[in-house]
Amino acid sequence: MELVIENLRAGYGKVQVLWDVNLRLAEGEFVAVIGANGAGKTTTLRAVSGLLRPGGGRVTLKGQDLTRLSPTQIVKLGLGHVPEGRELFPGMTVLENLELGASIRDEARTRKNETLAQVQELFPRLAERRSQLAGTLSGGEQQMLAVGRALMSCPKVLLVDEPSLGLSPLLTQTVFRALKAVNATGVGVLLVEQNVMQSLQLAERAYVLENGRVVNEGLGRDLLTDPSVREAYLAL
Ligand code: ATP
């Protein structure tokens, strides 16, 4: 197993949000986490990437315990995070944002030019806009840049938080297709989405999160036809 999340608990102050969440991602797997607003999807990713200190449980990446490490140490071990809201540096150019993505890991710095070429191949738009300030990009372009910047760290596993947020259906397709292409290069992808139909089509496996608990899991295509999923998330 590449990424193992065991009995993860997390919250904000006295408010517990995650209750013993268990998730697994095999090497090179594409897994989705679906759930309604406030189910705890973002909180799960933040607790895995060290942005939020878990209150209990364990997270391991290739057997290495991440649970008490800093976000920087976690990136160094090969976990990339595309956070909700993208968190780009608006006053820096596209190229500068991408280069920053490679700055934390030694192996990423060594392979910077090679990775940059791959990212620009994946997102030709970023190559065209390389000298433009990130803050002036369109929403879709910013999302591509956020994914591209995370890829610059040469992650083994990429956590992606709600990339379709605020994007047109067409741009959502572009970003999803890019994630599939990233996954095809061997990078494991853990995708959090409210866009249930598309993420279940995209992912091999998925987990359903409700009120901070995993209530269902299975193959993406099986969950698409699961009556409880169809009723709660697909309004069918
Ligand atoms: P969405 O799809 O709406 O982003 P989500 O599944 O990602 O939802 P989370 O963002 O993980 O949900 O939020 C889970 C719960 O934690 C919500 O009830 C939310 O109000 C609460 N929460 C999130 N961030 C904070 C915070 N910084 N302080 C206090 N409570 C928070």
Image: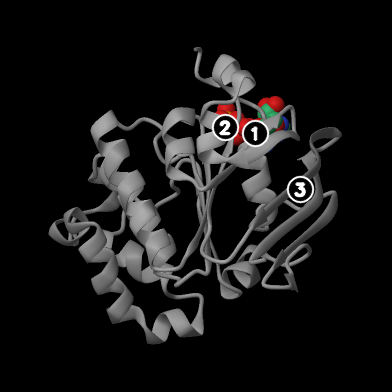
In the picture, the quarter occupied by the N terminus is: bottom right
Front of the two marks 2 and 1: 2
Q: What residue type is labelled 3?
A: Asn
Select label 3 or label 2 by which is in front. Answer: 2
Q: Which residue is tagged 2?
A: 223
Q: Position of residue 196 (x, y in %)?
A: 49, 29
- Of the residues shown, which amino acid type is indicated by label 1? Val
Q: What element carries label 3?
A: strand
Is residue 93 visible to the viewer in this orientation of the structure? no
Name the residue beneath numbered marker 3.
22
Which badge, 2 or 1, is on the more N-terminal residue? Answer: 1
Q: Can residue 2 be seen in this view?
A: yes
Q: Tell me residue 191's x, y (percent).
A: 51, 46
Residue drawn at 45 percent across, 49 percent down? 87
Q: Are marks 2 and 1 in contact (CB under 8 Å)?
A: yes
Q: Dividing the picture into quarters, in which one does residue 132 lie?
A: bottom left
Residue 119: x %, y % from top left: 29, 65
- Which residue is drawn at the image coordinates 27% and 44% (left, top)? 174
Residue annotated with mark 1: 208
Q: Residues within 10 Å of mark 2 (few under 14, many from 20)?
A: many
Classify 147 as above or below 208: below
Where is residue 233, by image quadrant? top right
What separation in Å lies between label 1 and label 3 (alpha carbons)? 11 Å
Element type where label 2 sits in the image:
helix
Q: Do the residues labelled 3 and 2 touch (CB within 8 Å)?
A: no
Q: Foreground: 226 or 37? A: 226
**Element under label 1?**
strand
N-term-proximal mark, 1 vs 3: 3
Ligand 1 falls in quadrant: top right
> What residue is at 26 percent from the left and 46 percent from the top?
141
Crowding at dot 3, Cα within 10 Å, few <14 / some 14-19 / many 20+, comes out as some
| Mark 2 residue type | Leu
